[in-house]
């Protein structure tokens, strides 16, 4: 059990929660806010470049606006690799959460994550195929150490009954979007002016700054995310190591088998094996959670509620996480980005969603506080979010069909409208689900449950990559299929809203 999880000393919780010195929240939130904003800056800067770099021609076209030569992959391979990478990014927090809960504590694990992430971006900045691929893997490991644990530390600032918890997570969500708004703008501009390698180097420099900010601000996190009171035994550590090695071996073996059958490299086939690995991990993880003999009846009900929330979240992220792949390519190839003689970098449109989130997140936080008990409950928020994100993709069928028919470029307002709908949907779902993951966590499992929440994002991301892979060359089909999946699950969540709420109430 981590010393500062939600089931720690309630007196300590009240003391921390009473120190409302940052936006009406505990002072430690300021360090978490700044650290996470900078890390998200680096990630979303690189994410905005990834698919465009992968699909850029191997030979420089001579057009300054395209960032120079890239990997020369076709769109189907690029979106599959993107989906596998983003899926891996949100899979690794499972291991990071266990390391925090059982060995190092969240505070130290977050520091290790920032250092590892910086190394990953340096490797990517080389632009060479093998070092770039290694950089993606190292980056995914670093984010696994960082992401779930820094989010769990937000929950550790509050007592279980502190009504500011949801607002605190909404501010945390705003820090994510502050970083993800500025990242594509700066990274995209640097890539256009100086090439893809320089664009990825921006992320590396940002992570060096992140490390410094976190080291300076750690004093404000005293008592939060410290060493576990009951660390893992030697047997538990050996079992954990065996599981990690087994997962890596499974992915590599499956990739090697596919390489024999299709003649492609193991590197390319990893994009196909990672989705199966993530599905297997999700099933195994939930089985182990439910088979835990020390769970109380209330905790088992909470886990059943979380399972339904998890499935709904997977459907949501299947659509939402295509922003960096399907929507990025739509912006690059289908959208008219010209303003007079100037053409806006397509990467900049990746900043629209986070900009809208920065604008609307505090509005929603204020609204939930204002409405108090009259606010919609979690199942209803999820249902609305799923239908909304599904409709956003269906909306793009109109301009995509026109482009396929006669080559008419889409007005930029189409993407702005889509991002507005997706922003509102994400604000309804993401901070609420993240908050619920700590509130529904069994005793001593706060960081691991947050990591499990991100596993839903992982599964949705990688499945979205596979949906896009098989439909992206068929015009409107990606938007029809992805949108339909989200809407169907939204209707299901609406019909099950009372069941989910009863399970959450225990």
Image (cartoon, rainbow, N blue to C red):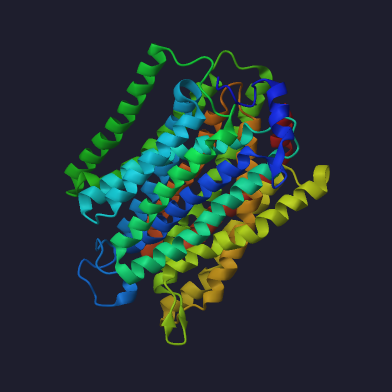
Residue at screen point 53% across, 23% down: 289
Residue 489 place in picture, x, y as percent: 59, 48
Residue at screen point 34% across, 57% down: 200
> In this rendering, does residue 475 appear at all?
no
From the viewer's perspective, tell me whether residue 36 is left or right of residue 159. left
Residue 302 place in picture, x, y as percent: 65, 28
Q: Quadrant of the C terminus?
A: top right
Query: In this picture, is 295 found above or below 145?
Result: above
Query: In this picture, is 228 found above or below 162?
Result: above
User: Looking at the image, which is closer to me, 331 or 38?
Assistant: 38
The number of numbered badges drawn on the structure is: 0
Query: In this picture, is 224 found above or below 492?
Result: above
Residue 169 place in picture, x, y as percent: 64, 43
Residue at screen point 53% across, 36% down: 218
> In this rendering, does residue 163 appear at all?
yes
Quarter-of-image position of residue 417: bottom right
């Amino acid at each position: 059990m981590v010393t500062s999880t939600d089931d720690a000393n309630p007196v300590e919780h009240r003391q921390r929660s009473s120190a409302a010195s940052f936006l009406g929240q505990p002072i430690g939130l300021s360090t978490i806010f700044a650290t996470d904003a900078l890390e998200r800056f680096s990630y979303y800067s690189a994410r905005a470049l990834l698919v465009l770099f992968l699909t850029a021609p191997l030979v420089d076209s001579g057009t300054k606006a395209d960032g120079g030569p890239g990997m020369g992959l076709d769109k189907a391979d690029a979106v599959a690799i993107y989906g596998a990478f983003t899926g891996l990014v949100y899979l690794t927090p499972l291991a990071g959460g266990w390391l925090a809960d059982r060995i190092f504590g969240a505070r130290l694990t977050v520091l290790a994550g920032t250092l590892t992430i910086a190394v990953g971006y340096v490797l990517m900045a080389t632009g060479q195929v093998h070092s770039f691929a290694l950089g993606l893997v190292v980056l995914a490991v670093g984010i696994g150490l960082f992401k779930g644990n820094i989010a769990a530390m937000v929950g550790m600032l509050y007592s279980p009954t502190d009504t500011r918890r949801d607002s605190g997570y909404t501010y945390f969500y705003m820090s994510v979007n502050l970083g993800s708004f500025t990242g594509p703008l700066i990274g995209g501009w640097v890539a256009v002016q100086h090439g893809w390698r320089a664009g990825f180097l921006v992320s590396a420099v940002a992570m060096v700054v992140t490390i410094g900010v976190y080291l300076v601000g750690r004093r404000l996190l005293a008592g939060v995310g410290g060493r576990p009171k009951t660390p893992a035994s030697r047997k538990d550590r050996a079992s954990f190591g065996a599981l990690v090695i087994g997962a890596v071996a499974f992915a590599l073996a499956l990739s090697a088998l596919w390489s024999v059958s299709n003649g492609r490299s193991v590197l390319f086939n990893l994009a196909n094996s990672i989705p199966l690995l993530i599905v297997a991990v999700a099933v195994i993880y939930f089985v182990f959670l439910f088979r835990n003999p020390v769970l109380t009846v209330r905790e088992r009900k909470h886990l059943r509620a979380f399972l339904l929330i998890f499935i709904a979240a997977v459907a949501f992220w299947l659509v939402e996480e295509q922003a960096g792949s399907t929507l990025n390519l739509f912006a690059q190839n289908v959208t008219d980005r010209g303003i007079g003689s100037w053409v806006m970098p397509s990467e900049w449109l990746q900043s629209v969603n986070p900009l809208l989130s920065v604008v609307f997140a505090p509005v929603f936080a204020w609204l939930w506080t204002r409405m108090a008990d009259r606010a919609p409950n979690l199942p209803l928020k999820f249902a609305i979010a799923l239908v909304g994100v599904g409709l956003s993709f269906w909306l793009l069928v109109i301009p995509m069909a026109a482009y396929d028919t006669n080559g008419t470029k889409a007005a930029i307002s189409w993407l702005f409208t889509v991002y507005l709908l997706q922003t509102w949907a994400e604000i309804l779902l993401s901070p609420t689900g993240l908050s619920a993951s700590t509130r529904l966590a069994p005793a001593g499992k706060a960081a691991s449950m947050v990591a499990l929440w991100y596993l839903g994002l992982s599964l949705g991301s990688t499945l979205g990559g596979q949906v896009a892979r098989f439909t992206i060359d068929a015009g409107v089909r990606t938007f029809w299929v992805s949108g339909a999946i989200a809407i169907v699950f939204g209707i299901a969540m609406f019909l099950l809203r009372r069941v989910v709420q009863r399970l959450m109430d225990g």
